[in-house]
Image (tube, helix red, strand yellow):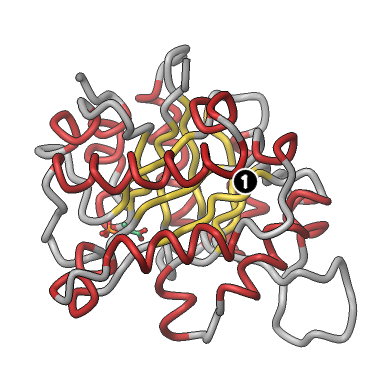
């Protein structure tokens, strides 16, 4: 059985004080879920403070990105060791905003993925097509290519630590969600590609999150789909009330 992972990507929002306030509110409302996993990914500057509050609680901590080297003269970069040091167990890799604004390529995504695994972080690898690509009927080809390139040289054993997030770019921050049926179709495709490469057992245990304008009012329908194993949530994760409702999805 796959345990759904509900993750909040706070992007470039929340000062340290605001992050602490949100973490406290989430801890108050989250309870002790056993059938789902909860994760928050604050900005780098708030990770340490959030991590201190989250230690020993049911909410895990993750980074939004990282560089692939453990240390060195890489001004402005944050390493997997540093993420581990402040309590992270997950890291988002290849978010479409990283690909779009910071030039992250499939090759960089693959390097970061290997570095995360080497340092004991669970990577959440984001893939997804743009609107013109979907309109041109290329969505599946684009996503399959991203999955294959991102997972290059990852072993079946390592795959047990990997999460994939399908995030159609046109649905991120737009209020425009993929229909549960369209999301399901892409998730099934991703699982098939993983199965072809790693075998059915690995594919069946892989968690594939959906991301793109997940909100309290659409989460139940999305999570009812058999291949959707949680959500990567941006905007709606910035308020405790909406994120907690998403965490408490009913399917
Ligand atoms: C995201 O940041 O990964 C995301 C899906 O954002 P939103 O939920 O705001 O669309």
Residue 249 in which image quadrant = top left
Figure quadrant, ligand 1: bottom left
Give x and y (percent) for residue 46.
58, 59
Residue positioned 25% across, 50% down in the render: 236
Q: Locate the C terminus and report the quarter of the image it occupies.
A: top left
Looking at this view, is 202 or 75 the one in front? 202
Residue positioned 19% across, 80% down in the render: 132
Looking at this view, is 251 or 128 the one in front? 128
Depicted 36 relative to depicted 178: above or below: above
Residue positioned 53% across, 55% down in the render: 125
Give x and y (percent) for residue 49.
63, 50
Depicted 39 relative to depicted 154: above or below: above
Furthest-right residue in view? Answer: 72
Give x and y (percent) for residue 177.
14, 54
Left/right of residue 240 with respect to residue 175 in the rendered view: right
Give x and y (percent) for residue 200.
53, 27
Looking at this view, is 215 or 118 the one in front? 118
Residue 82 in which image quadrant = bottom right
Left/right of residue 57 with respect to residue 2 in the rendered view: right
Residue positioned 68% across, 46% down in the render: 88
Q: Mark 1 = which residue?
A: 90
Q: Count the numbered circles shown.
A: 1
**SS label for mark 1:** strand
């Amino acid at each position: 059985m796959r345990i759904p992972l509900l993750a909040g990507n706070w992007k470039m929002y929340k000062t340290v004080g605001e992050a602490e306030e949100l973490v406290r509110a989430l801890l108050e409302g989250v309870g002790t879920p056993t059938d789902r996993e909860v994760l928050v990914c604050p900005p780098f500057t708030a990770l340490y403070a959030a991590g201190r509050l989250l230690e020993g609680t049911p909410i895990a901590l993750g980074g939004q990105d990282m560089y692939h080297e453990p240390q060195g003269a890489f001004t402005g970069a944050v390493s997997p060791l540093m993420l581990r040091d402040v309590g992270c167990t997950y890291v988002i890799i290849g978010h479409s905003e990283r690909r779009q604004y910071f030039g992250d390529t499939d090759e960089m995504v693959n390097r970061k993925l290997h570095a995360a695994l080497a340092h004991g972080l669970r990577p959440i690898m984001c893939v997804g097509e743009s609107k013109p690509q979907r309109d041109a009927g290329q969505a599946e080809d684009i996503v399959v290519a991203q999955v294959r390139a991102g997972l290059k040289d990852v072993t079946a054993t390592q795959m047990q630590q990997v999460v994939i997030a399908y995030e159609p770019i046109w649905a991120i921050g737009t209020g425009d969600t993929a229909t549960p049926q369209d999301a399901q179709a892409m998730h099934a495709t991703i699982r098939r590609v993983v199965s072809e490469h790693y075998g059915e057992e690995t594919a069946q245990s892989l968690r594939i999150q959906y991301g793109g304008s997940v909100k309290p009012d659409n989460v139940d329908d999305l999570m009812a789909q058999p291949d959707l194993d949680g959500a990567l949530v941006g905007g709606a994760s910035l308020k405790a009330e909406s994120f907690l409702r998403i965490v408490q999805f009913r399917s």
